[in-house]
Image (cartoon, rainbow, N blue to C red):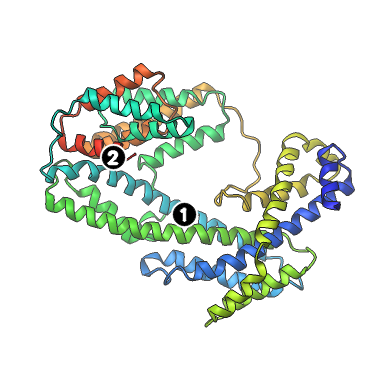
């Protein structure tokens, strides 16, 4: 009852020091309880995700070991109070996990492009041909009818973007660069962070960004990248295609496995960060239960049946505290947007800034940036033009040095990452039909048609 009255009071403008302090205390306690419960439930799942990564993934293995070690130390200190270094140690693990995920994402960008290329080369060796009576005009109408039959606007827009990406890429370089420039024009009036973020996404999708230790951290994946760089993609033989296909399939399976591990490990690290940032909370029964489960899980040779029996004590806790925390998190967002001056007057701005960080750590965006930043400035149009010109210059050099299949794959990806250049139905119809009719490579057209129909 007190919780609800405190929230209602603050929401209605009664931002007294007592109300704000009480609210912060309750939210901090909810955050710790929620994080401990999530660790207790997710840690066994993480440790059961198969064997530790092999020597090719030692960086993940080291992070995993470091996490378990720090969690064990924090768990022992929960009752008496944490060592002041624990928060810094947890945030350091988060920084490392973010860097690892950036590396894995960079490999994902590359493997996705390679898969796109191989899909369009596959039919060269199948002996298949276009169906009797096929026409580009009929295929265009089939695509348009499928789009128009979708009543959900969000789904329809998603389908449209996917279709444009999968159509044969026959846009001229000049038009392609124009589309990128026009797409970046839409960011005029935006803040610098948004502009830089979009430019970075375009660069990474085009494989222009290579993170630090790209080769050293994942040599097995790097070997795949080097193989594709040297492969004669424009004139690949069936034997070479099969070799590349099998190599990429194995690499993508392993990459997805490691990314799944990292996503869960990141959530565990975020929860540990929350625990270290909420020291001083009152020790309650739920904390004791979670601590016992964590200790039991970290002990070698844990009996699975006994662990499952212990986990039944946590049924409903995550749902309950997640709902409580989300309600408070929404209010914090509102106050940090509209009432910073009042929070500052009450000496609570720093406290609520910390609550905002807790909200980010417990959000669905596992890799959310939690660093406190100055408000980003709105950029001049000239800045966007200069940065876009620099990107286009890099892309121009990259596309010239790349095989046609690879260049087209990158172009197809990038045109879907800027605001859509097609404005109306007539433009869409014209673009689809031109893409199909300009493609004289029957194998590529067959692949594109099959992929689009599968959408």
- Residue at the image point whose x is 37% and y is 69% from the top: 55
Task: Point out residue 391 in the picture as x, y percentages from the top left corner.
Answer: 39, 32
Q: Secondary structure at mark 2?
A: helix
Tell me which numbered mark, 2 or 1, is placed earlier along the sequence: 1
Q: Nearer the viewer, residue 321 or 335?
A: 321
Task: Point out residue 319 in the picture as x, y percentages from the top left corner.
Answer: 66, 57
Mark 1 — residue? 101
Q: In the picture shown, does residue 443 fall above or below 139?
A: below
- Using residue 36 as the reference point, say whether residue 224 is left or right of it: left
Asked if the residue at tag 1 contacts the one at tag 2, i.e. Cβ–Cβ closer than 8 Å, the answer is: no
Question: Does the image show residue 402?
Answer: no
* Quadrant of the frame with the C terminus: top left
Q: In the picture shown, does residue 329 fall above or below 53?
A: above
Density class for disc 1 (Cα within 10 Å; few <14, some 14-19, many ≥20) is some
- Using residue 314 as the reference point, say whether residue 102 is left or right of it: left
Task: Point out residue 21 in the picture as x, y percentages from the top left corner.
Answer: 84, 51
Which quadrant would residue 83 be assigned to in this image?
Answer: bottom right
Residue placed furthest toward the top: 426
Q: Nearer the viewer, residue 242 or 190?
A: 242
Q: Secondary structure at mark 1?
A: helix
Q: In the picture shown, does residue 416 fall above or below 285?
A: above
Question: Does the image show residue 320?
Answer: yes
| Residue 213 - label | none
- Using residue 191 as the reference point, say whether residue 227 is left or right of it: left
- Residue at the image point whose x is 53% and y is 23% from the top: 188
- Residue at the image point whose x is 84% and y is 45% from the top: 347
Q: Nearer the viewer, residue 150 or 332?
A: 150
Alpha-carbon span between mark 2 and mark 1: 29 Å
Which quadrant would residue 407 be assigned to in this image?
Answer: top left
| Residue 451 - label | 2
């Amino acid at each position: 009852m007190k919780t609800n009255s405190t929230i209602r009071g603050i929401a209605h403008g009664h931002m007294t020091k007592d109300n704000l302090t009480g609210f912060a205390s309750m939210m901090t306690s909810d955050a710790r309880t929620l994080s401990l419960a999530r660790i207790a439930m997710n840690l066994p799942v993480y440790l059961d995700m198969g064997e530790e990564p092999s020597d090719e993934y030692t960086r993940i293995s080291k992070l995993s070991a470091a996490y378990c070690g720090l969690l064990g130390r924090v768990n022992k200190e929960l009752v008496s109070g944490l060592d002041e270094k624990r928060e810094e140690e947890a945030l350091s693990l988060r920084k490392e996990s973010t860097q690892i995920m950036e590396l894995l994402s960079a490999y994902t960008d590359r493997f996705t492009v390679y898969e796109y290329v191989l899909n369009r080369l596959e039919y060269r060796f199948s002996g298949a041909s276009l169906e009797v009576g096929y026409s580009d005009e009929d295929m265009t109408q089939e695509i348009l009818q499928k789009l128009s039959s979708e009543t959900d606007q969000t789904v329809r827009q998603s389908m449209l973007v996917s279709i444009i990406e999968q159509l044969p890429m026959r846009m001229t370089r000049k038009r392609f660069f124009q589309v990128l420039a026009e797409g970046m024009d839409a960011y005029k009036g935006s803040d610098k962070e948004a502009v830089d973020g979009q430019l970075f996404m375009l660069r990474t999708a085009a494989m222009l960004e290579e993170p630090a230790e790209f080769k050293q951290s994942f040599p097995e994946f790097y070997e795949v990248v080097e193989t594709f760089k040297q492969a004669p993609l424009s004139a690949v033989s069936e034997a070479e295609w099969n070799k590349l296909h099998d190599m990429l399939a194995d690499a993508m399976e392993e990459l997805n496995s490691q990314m799944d591990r990292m996503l869960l490990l990141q959530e565990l690290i975020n929860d540990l960060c929350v625990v270290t940032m909420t020291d001083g909370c009152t020790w309650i029964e739920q904390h004791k239960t979670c601590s016992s489960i964590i200790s039991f899980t970290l002990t070698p040779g844990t009996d699975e049946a006994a662990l499952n029996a212990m986990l039944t004590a946590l049924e409903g806790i995550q749902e309950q505290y997640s709902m409580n925390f989300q309600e408070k998190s929404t209010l914090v967002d509102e106050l940090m947007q509209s009432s910073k001056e009042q929070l500052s007057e009450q000496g609570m701005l720093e406290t609520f800034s910390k609550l905002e960080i807790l909200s980010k750590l417990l959000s669905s965006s596992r890799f959310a940036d939690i660093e406190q930043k100055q408000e980003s400035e709105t950029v001049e149009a000239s800045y966007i033009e200069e940065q876009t010109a620099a990107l286009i210059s890099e892309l121009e050099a990259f596309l010239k040095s790349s095989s046609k299949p690879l260049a087209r794959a990158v172009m197809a990806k990038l045109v879907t990452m800027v605001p859509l250049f097609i404005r109306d139905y007539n433009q869409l119809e014209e673009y689809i039909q031109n893409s199909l009719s300009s493609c004289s490579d029957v194998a590529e057209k067959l692949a594109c048609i099959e992929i689009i129909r599968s959408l």
